Amino acid sequence: VQLQASGGGLVQAGRSLRLSCAASGSIFSINVMAWYRQAPGNQRELVAKIIHSGASSYADSVKGRFTISRDNANNTVYLQMNSLIPGDTAVYYCNAVVTTAPRSPSYIYWGQGTQVTVSS
């Protein structure tokens, strides 16, 4: 299973970016998909997560500005980031809890990370 993230870049404060992460490989089902971020000198933190039904949750720091969504048919998760601030600058990683066969255990997979830089 591989996760391929894309969509990062350099933007000015107040602008928007949309991140995408597509999972591929031997996938039976994906329960949770999530976005994490890690700024220099900081620990990796959960930004948002979404389960198969579409229910989602967010870190307090991004509530009202970021929206996570998923396309179950294409095993893809998105992160729409609006009203970006310099504090959002980080490497963003996608994450998925994947089951590769019926009645088999689930495993966590990570994407390679995409840099988001917000200038003031």
Image: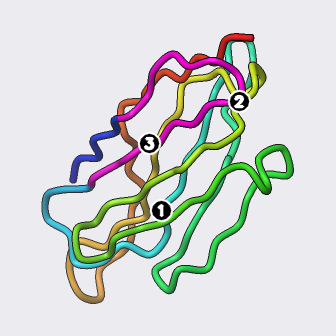
Give residue 117's position: percent from left, percent from top: 58, 17
Residue 19: name its quadrant. Answer: top left
Quadrant where the C terminus is found in the figure: top right
Query: Looking at numbered disc 2 in the image, what kind of residue is underneath it?
Result: Gly
Residue at 30% across, 78% down: 29
Highlighted magenta segment, given as a residue range: 7-22
The residue at which mark 2 appears reads as 14
Looking at the image, do the residues carrying marks 3 and 2 touch, with CB atoms under 8 Å apart? no
Which numbered disc covers residue 107?
A: none
Distance, label 1 to label 2, CA atoms, is 26 Å
The residue mark sitting in front, 3 or 1, is: 3
The residue mark sitting in front, 3 or 2, is: 2
Element marked by disc 1: strand
Which numbered disc covers residue 19?
A: 3
The residue at which mark 1 appears reads as 33
Residue at 34% across, 70% down: 71
Give residue 72's position: percent from left, percent from top: 32, 75
Q: Residues within 10 Å of mark 2 (few under 14, many from 20)?
A: some
